[in-house]
Amino acid sequence: MRAVQFDTYGDVDVLEVRDVPRPAPGRGQLLVRVRTAAVNPDDLPRIEGQLDEILPVTFPAGVGCDFAGVVEEVGEGVNHLAIGSEVIGFSHSHDALAEYVVAPRHHVVHRPATVSWEVGGGLALAGMTAYAAVRAVAPRPGETILVSAAAGGVGSLVVQLVQRTGAAVVGIAGRQHHSWLREHGVVPVDHAGTVAEIAAAVTHAAGGPVHALVDCFGHGYVEAAVELLGVPPDRIDTVVDMGAARRFGAGNLGQESAAQAHVLEELVRLASTGELEVPIATVLPLADLRLAYRLLEGHHTHGKIVLSVD
């Protein structure tokens, strides 16, 4: 089968599509023939070796966490899904950018026909990250919640999940994404300018206090929220800036804290009923994986970048 792997740390040029043996499911696992899979910001520091001290890899290493596809085989003890079932899932083994992936049964849920393959392949990691971050800051009706990178793969889901709580949302994003944010009830703020200038624009847009921050971008927003906007650190969650979280005592809850089947099932349900829009920036063939990661590195895409594997 074809799979994305790399043999040494480096930039995206170390990634290759190569032929590898097809895995087999063990007890409590499923083998899924992948239709679509997403690229994620979390992949980049792993490929570059920035996480080597805490999460070293064994070479050759794979890439990819979330996927959608069709169950090819089931291991002993798997009863809730049968061969031929269309599914959405995630893998903590970083091997989803491949024609086949093995995943535990509790990481895979049914794909409704109303959820496209593209959305299914891009939903799990971004959705669970957004879910965890929103839960961490606990928005309440009538509050104003600030979201950075509000039109990105995670941020575009965060703003919608926050609104479901009855809170108002101010979203920082490029001007090209402001119309989408307004259509979804978000007050947009341009990301151009210094962090201090952006904070001043946020204050004006909010028309009152900012009660919490979900930071999907980093680069000084946690510090600005604490020091310029007066947001209590316990009402801040950053999904990207672990250093700022430690320095200011803010939260840093990634998707791991929400990586549960019932969370994924709820996200899939919301997507299937149209209550949660999952923007797809582009869909590329697996052979264009390096281009996909370069687009991701640019930080200007609206929504998820998904690879078509089959």
Image: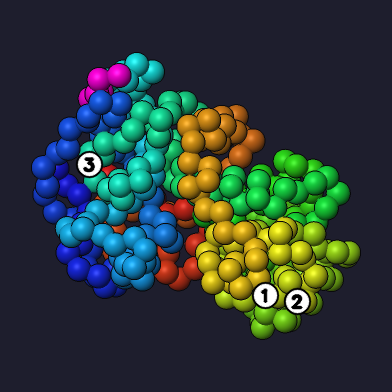
Name the residue type under label 2. Glu
Mark 1 packing: few (<14 Cα in 10 Å), some, or many (20+)? many
Reading the image, the residue beneath label 2 is 227
Mark on residue 283?
A: none
Q: Nearer the viewer, mark 1 or mark 3?
A: 1
Q: Is the stretch drawn in magenta largely helix, strand or loop?
A: loop
Q: Amino acid at mark 3?
A: Glu
Q: Residue 218, image x and y in percent?
A: 57, 70
Around disc 3, counting alpha carbons within 10 Å, would you say few (fewer than 14), some (14 to 19), or many (20 or more)?
many
Residue 183 appears anywhere in the view: no
Picture quarter containing residue 18?
Answer: bottom left
Residue at disc 3, secondary structure: loop
Q: Relative to residue 199, is residue 257 depicted above or below?
A: above
Magenta extent: 73-77
* Label 1 sits on residue: 223
| Secondary structure of residue under mark 2 | helix
Q: Which residue is mark 3?
A: 99
Q: Earlier in the sequence, mark 3 or mark 2?
A: 3
Of the pair 15 and 272, the residue shown nearer to us: 15
Which residue occupies 20% across, 68% down? 8
Task: Judge whether residue 74 is colored magenta.
Answer: yes
Q: CA distance from mark 1 to mark 3?
A: 42 Å
